[in-house]
């Protein structure tokens, strides 16, 4: 390590201590001088001490084979000694102030460790970790207030969702199993994660942003992943009377509009020459869906109780989420079987079936089959058939789960999107298809 790099790394170590010390010193700025275990100067020196210790450990003469072990021993001993000193002073500070907290001691240890890492590791990671640590220290009141407000069902659902994502997902095989191309278990599990995430997102959005904005924000965000998931989540809430059916239907309309635009984006990225045939119908359907959402939101404008009455009791139900994901996996296998059995005609039939579960998968597969297996017109028909199938499925979901006015509104929404989108598709093929 040359002199310029050494100075730069020591400067980063000092900056790490100054940053963390600034937050610690500001928080105890009203304390009597001499009553604090560590302030801005102590933390700045701690960061620099970690950097100097690492530099000294690297500079010590040592056999080549034992270099890494010697460095680890020196840093370990120095860190243990520093930790003992800062913990002792933090304990005395707590006793004098009548507090019970390990934050100062832990922050000091982290400052020393990051200062050392700035010398022997990646300076960017060390600096980024220091910024993250400072943000956590500064957000003490907000974090404590959030923890006080969170309920057990919310915490349980968050833990289950994290376990599904970071424990269950990595251990599942990423290869298809079963006949007709099989089902990728990881993809099916991803569907379950999406369904659970959409439900949890809707719950959190309504809680923190209010009914009107929360429902629309959650629906728009959920529609990026799956409008079907939004429909199922809102249908369950309509059935449980956890909100106005019309507001929940407006959320489904927004998610549907996002789905139409999402398909356009996939086609634009993979096969732009198909846009001229695909885009008009999907844009018309998206505009129709947004129109319904605006109309329903305006309809509810005079009824303020419809907004205040929304109260979601449970973020999501794990068993029902996993069960529906398995059902969608079966639908995917059936759609592929139809495609393999009946050729181009089967591709459209398969797209209709698979579209009930995954419009994106149909869009990608149909685009890849063009022009070798399917013509441009056949691929577009299959994509639009999948989108239409997904739209029709919302009627079935509304009738089977949501029922009542929610089901009626979804029937109107689906019929309107199909009629307007279908008319646009007919005109497009009449004038632009080869």
Image (cartoon, rainbow, N blue to C red):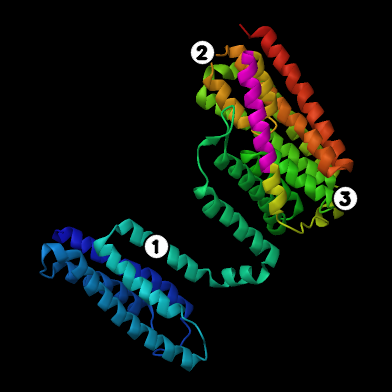
**Image position, residue 422 (x, y; %):** 74, 19
Q: Quadrant of the C terminus?
A: top right
Residue 123 in percent (x, y) is at 30, 59
Looking at the image, residue 237 sits to the left or right of residue 72; the answer is right
Residue under the image location 57 percent in, 56 percent down: 162
Horizontal side, residue 231 vs residue 267: left or right: right
Label 2 packing within 10 angstroms: few (<14), some (14-19), many (20+): few
Question: Can residue 36 be seen in this snapshot?
Answer: no
Q: Magenta stretch: give its range.
A: 325-344
Q: Is residue 306 left or right of residue 35?
A: right
326 in magenta: yes
- In this view, the residue farthest toward the front is 179
Mark 1 or 3 closer to N-term?
1
* Image height of 51 relative to 211, above or below: below
Which residue is denoted by mark 2 in the rendering?
A: 372
The residue under label 3 is 303
**Residue 248 drawn above or below residue 48:** above
Sequence-wise, the earlier of marks 2 and 3 is 3
Q: Secondary structure at mark 3?
A: loop
Spatial CA span between label 2 and label 3: 56 Å
Local packing at callout 3 (Cα closer than 10 Å; few below 14, some 14-19, many 20+) is few
112 falls in the magenta region: no
Secondary structure beneath label 2: loop
Q: Which mark is residue 129?
A: 1
Q: Secondary structure at mark 1?
A: helix
Overall secondary structure of the magenta section? helix
Q: Position of residue 105 (x, y in %)?
A: 41, 80
């Amino acid at each position: 390590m040359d002199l310029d790099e050494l100075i730069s790394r020591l400067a980063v170590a000092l900056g790490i201590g100054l940053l963390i010390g600034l937050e610690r010193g500001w928080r105890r700025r009203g304390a009597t001088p001499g009553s604090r275990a560590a302030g801005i100067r102590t933390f700045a020196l701690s960061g620099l001490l970690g950097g100097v210790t690492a530099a000294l450990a690297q500079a010590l003469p040592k056999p080549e084979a034992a270099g890494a072990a010697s460095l680890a021993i020196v840093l370990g001993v120095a860190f243990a000694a520093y930790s003992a000193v800062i913990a002792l002073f933090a304990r005395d500070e707590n006793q004098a102030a009548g507090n019970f907290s390990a934050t100062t001691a832990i922050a000091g240890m982290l400052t020393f460790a990051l200062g050392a890492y700035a010398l022997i590791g990646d300076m960017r990671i060390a600096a980024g970790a220091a910024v993250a640590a400072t943000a956590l220290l500064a957000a003490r009141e907000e974090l404590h207030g959030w923890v006080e407000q969170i309920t057990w069902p919310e915490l349980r659902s968050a833990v289950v969702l994290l376990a599904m994502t970071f424990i269950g997902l990595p251990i599942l095989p990423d290869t298809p199993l079963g006949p007709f191309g099989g089902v990728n278990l990881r993809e099916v599990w991803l569907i379950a994660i999406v369904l659970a995430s959409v439900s949890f997102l809707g719950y959190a959005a309504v809680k923190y942003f209010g009914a009107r904005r929360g429902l629309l924000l959650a629906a728009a965000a959920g529609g990026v992943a799956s409008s079907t998931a939004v429909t199922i989540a809102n249908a369950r809430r309509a059935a449980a009377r956890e909100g106005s059916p019309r507001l929940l239907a407006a959320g489904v309309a927004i998610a549907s509009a996002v789905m139409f635009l999402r398909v356009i984006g996939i086609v634009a990225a993979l096969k732009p020459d198909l846009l001229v045939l695909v885009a008009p119908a999907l844009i018309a359907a998206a505009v129709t869906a947004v129109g319904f959402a605006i109309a329903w939101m305006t309809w509810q404008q005079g009824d303020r109780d419809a907004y205040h009455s929304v109260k979601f009791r449970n973020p999501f139900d794990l068993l029902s989420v996993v069960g529906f994901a398995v059902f969608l996996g079966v639908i995917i296998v059936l759609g592929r079987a139809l495609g393999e059995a009946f050729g181009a005609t089967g591709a459209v039939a398969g797209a209709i079936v698979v579209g009930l579960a995954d419009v994106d998968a149909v869009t990608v597969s149909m685009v890849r089959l063009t022009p070798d297996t399917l013509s441009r017109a056949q691929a577009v028909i299959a994509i639009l058939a999948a989108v239409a199938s997904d739209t029709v499925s919302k009627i079935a979901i509304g009738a089977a789960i949501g029922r009542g006015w929610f089901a009626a509104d979804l029937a109107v929404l689906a019929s309107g999107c199909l009629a307007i989108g279908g008319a646009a598709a007919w005109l497009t093929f009449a004038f632009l298809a080869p």
